[in-house]
Amino acid sequence: MTRLLIVTAVEAEAAAVRTGVLASGVDPATVDVIPVGVGPAAAAAGTARLLALAEAGGAAYRAVISAGIAGGFPGRAEVGATVLGARTIAADLGAESPEGFLPVDRLGFGSNLLEADPALLKTLTTALPHAIVGDILTLSTVTGTAGTAAALLTRHPDAVAEAMEGYGVACAAQAAGVPCGELRTVSNPIGPRDRAAWRLREAFSALTEATAAACG
Ligand SMILES: O=C(O)c1cccc(C(=O)CC[C@H]2O[C@@H](n3cnc4c(=O)[nH]cnc43)[C@H](O)[C@@H]2O)c1
């Protein structure tokens, strides 16, 4: 029996995903849903540990999905929307310069971008035909100004959403040779910080629905 690993940042996201797994009718023993912490470092460390333990136990995961809530770029992914990452991009991994931000690949230190596994992405887009497919940015800092939102879109014209874990999860999956994808539902618009505008209940409910469809 090969298992699927779904990692979230926080327990509230994991609970929404587990409800979706149960609703899908799939054998819940075939899907592990585990919160690994907020941010790319916690996500990479937590996911790498889970993948290594499973492999060492002779029951490697068949795939890993980074799931949770996200900020959506207005006009591209509105609150309540489901987004699937075609690519995950570490949007703040690099260096500042007087000429602007220099991504890590321009510095000659690897890449700030990882593509979703094509077969996994195809499975997810087929199960979720209304999902918005595009680049999902990973940031250590939640965007809180119109200026940063605009700068991110200039640098990443295919971005639809931002969150804080996808690139970390993808790095761990790549190191383990496990297919990886990212599934998120939008809780808030990206732009000037307005915590009161976050629609957590709507996003968690959309996350449950998306998981049920994706696993079913
Ligand atoms: O209130 C805050 O400013 C705040 C700061 C850090 C984390 C949070 C969370 O609620 C953590 C949950 C999770 O949500 C993802 N998320 C949701 N919206 C965004 C966003 O606009 N930009 C980046 N990440 C977002 C993220 O993956 C967090 O792990 C709240």
Image (cartoon, rainbow, N blue to C red):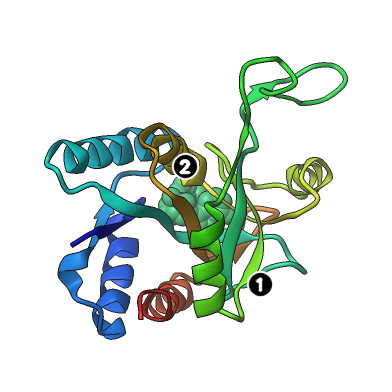
* Residue 198 can be seen in this image: no
Q: Which residue is mark 2?
A: 170
- Residue at mark 2 to residue at mark 1: CA–CA distance: 24 Å
Q: Is residue 101 above or below residue 5?
A: above
> Which quadrant of the figure contains the N terminus?
bottom left
> Which quadrant of the figure contains the C terminus?
bottom left
Q: Is residue 62 above or below residue 54?
A: below
- x, y (%) of residue 13? 35, 63
Please name whichever residue, 180 or 46, is drawn nearer the observer in this view of the structure.
180
- Mark 2 crowd level (few <14, some 14–19, many ≥20, 10 Å Cα): many
Give residue 78's quadrant in the image: bottom right
- Contact between labelled residues 1 and 2, with CB atoms less than 8 Å apart: no
Disc on the earlier residue, 2 or 1: 1
- x, y (%) of residue 168? 45, 38
| Amino acid on which the number 1 mark rests in the picture | Glu
- x, y (%) of residue 93? 61, 28
Numbered disc 2: secondary structure: helix
Q: Residue at x 69, y 23 (%)?
A: 105
Q: Is mark 1 within 8 Å of ligand 1?
A: no
- x, y (%) of residue 172? 39, 36
Q: Which mark is residue 203?
A: none
Q: Is residue 13 above or below residue 78?
A: above
Q: Residue at x 47, y 72 (%)?
A: 203
Numbered disc 1: secondary structure: loop
Q: Residue at x 37, y 40 (%)?
A: 43
Q: Which mark is residue 78?
A: 1
Please name whichever residue, 24 or 148, is drawn nearer the observer in this view of the structure.
24
Q: Is residue 51 left or right of residue 204?
A: left
